[in-house]
């Protein structure tokens, strides 16, 4: 257990200068290429663009839903937004948390992001999840990190690999 903790501390310390180069939220109104290249798919939206919150977009299922994640390196906040298949509307879930599993070498850790602004009533729902954890955020923006998002929407589990993207002109 101690080796796992030291492994994540070492990852965070080694990656902190990389995180300081600024892979946090982009200023409103500026769209960027998330894959390092231009391409378009024939299913109603362009994965080359950031999501509506200027974050990194992940496909859930066969384009059934999407997850968009952002990281603010100043505060250490990682936010995941669940979105519909067109990246336009929230896709709420009854889950209280969603999970991001990070593996660095032989060390693996699961982070739970808490639901934000759950609706009231018999079946509270949320489409936004957050966790303030600079170690997680740094891991997500570091090349070579193996990270996976797991979420349940409408009673169906979804898993998506979170891959580091080298933006044109933006290197870690």
Image: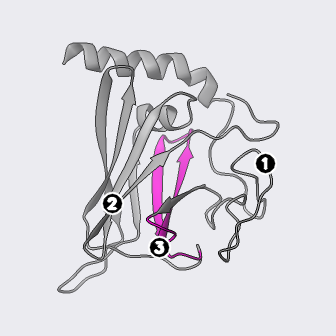
Q: Which residue is mark 1?
A: 37
- The picture places residue 49, in percent across and down from the top left corner, at 72, 60
- The picture places residue 154, in percent across and down from the top left corner, at 30, 77
Q: Which residue is mark 3?
A: 64
Q: Nearer the viewer, mark 2 or mark 1?
A: 1
Tell me if residue 106 comes above or below residue 125 in the rendering.
above
The mark nearer the N terminus, 3 or 1, is: 1
Task: State yes or no: residue 70 in magenta.
Answer: yes
Q: Which residue is mark 2?
A: 151
Q: How busy is the neighbourhood of tag 3: few (under 14 within 10 Å), some, or many (20 plus)?
A: few
Tell me if label 3 and label 2 are in contact, CB under 8 Å. no
Q: Quadrant of residue 157?
A: bottom left
**Disc 2 on helix, strand or loop?**
strand
Tell me if residue 138 comes above or below residue 98 in the rendering.
above
Classify residue 94 as left or right of residue 129: left
The mark nearer the N terminus, 3 or 2, is: 3
Q: Quadrant of residue 130?
A: bottom left
Q: Nearer the viewer, residue 105 or 73?
A: 105
**Disc 3 on helix, strand or loop?**
loop
The mark nearer the N terminus, 2 or 1, is: 1
* Residue depicted at 31% across the width and 42% down the height: 111
Label disc, if present, on residue 91 of the rendered structure = none
Classify residue 47 as left or right of residue 130: right
Tell me if label 2 and label 1 are in contact, CB under 8 Å. no
Q: Which residues are magenta?
A: 61-86
Q: How busy is the neighbourhood of tag 2: few (under 14 within 10 Å), some, or many (20 plus)?
A: some
* Residue depicted at 27% across the width and 58% down the height: 97
Q: Quadrant of the C terminus?
A: top right
Q: Quadrant of the N terminus?
A: top left
């Amino acid at each position: 257990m101690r080796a796992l903790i030291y492994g994540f501390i070492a990852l965070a310390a080694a990656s902190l200068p990389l995180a300081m180069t600024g892979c946090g939220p982009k200023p409103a109104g500026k769209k960027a290429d998330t894959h390092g290249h231009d391409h378009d798919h024939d299913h109603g939206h362009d994965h080359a663009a950031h999501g509506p919150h200027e974050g990194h977009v992940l496909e859930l299922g066969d384009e059934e839903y999407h997850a968009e994640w952002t990281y603010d390196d100043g505060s250490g906040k990682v936010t995941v937004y669940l979105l519909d298949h067109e990246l336009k509307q929230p896709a709420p879930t009854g889950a209280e948390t969603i999970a991001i599993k990070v593996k660095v070498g032989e060390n693996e850790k699961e982070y739970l992001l808490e639901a934000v602004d759950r609706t009231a009533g018999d079946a509270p729902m949320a489409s936004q999840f957050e966790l303030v954890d600079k170690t997680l955020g740094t891991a997500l923006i570091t090349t070579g990190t193996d990270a996976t998002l797991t979420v349940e929407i409408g009673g169906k589990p979804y898993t998506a690999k979170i891959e580091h993207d080298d933006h044109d002109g933006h290197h870690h």
